[in-house]
């Protein structure tokens, strides 16, 4: 989703590609960040080819920046995951004077946050330590930062930060979460949202020592892979969760464990019958995946219960 020019005073235009569904997409809901909460807003929709244009007409202040996301819905009321967050400014007619002219208001947004990443080395069970690059503002006053976490059908606000970092807690250990951060200056101007970043929340399970052997048989557009997990420590692993990245591959089937994929993050969790790995013992699991063209890069790292494994 991206911004789109809507030449109506107080309106904000958005554009996105049409959603698809196994039956049919029946509509879209658009949400705006207004007074500290995401609120559904009245939107007129126009379609052209593969594109949808939404013009938000409800309760927007001309010249003010807003964050938006859109959710698609089908005839049974099923909702899609939310789009990425997008910043758009409500149209002003006639246009305001361009800052920094004499007497003109500050209308210049801060820089866009970049480099959002997870910081390692601090134990935060059920949490993630996030940091990003500092941005500046034309006022010379450091902006504030608003952090958002993607949910199944929307976004949760994780709070305001005066520095480019935040510790998010209360999460499910071993589960991936996606975040975006927005900079906000003293005049209320918003930066564009950062690129989405996905990180896995720390687990509170005991530390493990492990080694992973990964082998695959690939053909054009597909592969079958075997993953052997060995306990190289001195105590038994009683319950395990393996995570790794498949940046271009799409998981189609997995066996000998519970397999899920969210974006590029693959999570594999034990069954009851293979939850215990004794010292010096191993479990073997596997999966099938597809990929476009020749884009088949094997996983470069594996994490078991939030601990990196040696690759053999």
Image (cartoon, rainbow, N blue to C red):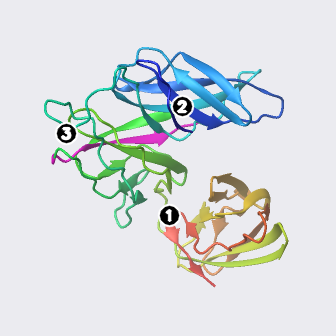
Where disc 3 sits, the SS reads: loop
- Quarter of the view holding residue 249: bottom right
74 lies above or below 259: above
Disc ID at residue 14:
2
Residue shown at 68%/74% (left/top)?
Answer: 298
* 147 inside magenta stretch: yes
28 lies above or below 250: above
In front of the other: 55 or 274: 55
In front of the other: 221 or 244: 221
Where disc 2 sits, the SS reads: strand
Quarter that holds the N terminus: top right
* 230 inside magenta stretch: no
Q: Position of residue 185 (x, y in %)?
A: 24, 39
67 lies above or below 162: above
Q: Magenta stretch?
A: 140-152
Where disc 1 sits, the SS reads: loop
Of the two numbered discs 2 and 1 on the same chain, state the one appearing first in sequence: 2
**Mark 1: few/some/many CA within 10 Å (<14, 14-19, 20+):** many
Disc ID at residue 100:
3
Residue shown at 71%/31% (left/top)?
Answer: 48
Residue shown at 33%/27% (left/top)?
Answer: 64
Residue shown at 79%/67% (left/top)?
Answer: 293
Disc ID at residue 306:
1
Marks 2 and 1, how far apart at CA: 39 Å
Q: Position of residue 40 (x, y in %)?
A: 51, 20
């Amino acid at each position: 989703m991206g911004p789109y020019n809507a030449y109506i005073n107080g309106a904000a235009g958005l554009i996105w590609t049409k959603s698809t569904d196994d039956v049919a997409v029946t509509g879209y809901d658009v949400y705006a960040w207004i007074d500290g909460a995401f609120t559904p807003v009245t939107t007129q929709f126009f379609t052209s080819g593969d594109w949808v244009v939404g013009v938000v007409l409800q309760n927007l202040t001309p010249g003010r920046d807003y964050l938006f996301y859109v959710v698609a819905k089908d005839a049974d009321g099923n909702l899609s995951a939310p789009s990425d967050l997008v910043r758009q400014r409500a149209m002003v007619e006639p246009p305001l004077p361009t800052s920094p002219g004499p007497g003109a208001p500050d209308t210049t947004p801060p820089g866009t946050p970049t480099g959002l990443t997870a910081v390692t080395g601090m134990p935060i069970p059920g949490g993630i330590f996030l940091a990003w690059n500092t941005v500046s503002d034309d006022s010379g006053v450091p902006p504030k930062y608003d952090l958002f976490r993607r949910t199944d059908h929307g976004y949760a606000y994780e709070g305001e930060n005066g520095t480019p970092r935040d510790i998010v807690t209360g999460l499910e250990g071993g589960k991936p979460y996606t975040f975006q951060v927005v900079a906000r200056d003293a005049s209320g101007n918003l930066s564009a949202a950062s690129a989405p970043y996905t990180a896995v929340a720390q687990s509170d399970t005991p530390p493990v020592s492990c080694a992973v052997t990964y082998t695959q048989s690939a053909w054009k557009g597909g592969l079958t892979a075997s993953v052997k997990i060995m306990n190289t420590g001195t105590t038994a692993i009683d319950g395990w969760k393996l995570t790794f990245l498949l940046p271009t591959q799409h998981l189609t089937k997995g066996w000998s464990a519970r397999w899920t994929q969210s974006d590029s993050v693959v999570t594999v969790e034990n069954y009851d019958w293979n939850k215990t790995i004794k010292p010096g013992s191993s479990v073997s699991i596997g999966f099938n995946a597809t990929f476009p063209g020749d884009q088949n890069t094997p996983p470069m790292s594996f994490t078991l219960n939030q601990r990196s494994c040696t690759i053999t």
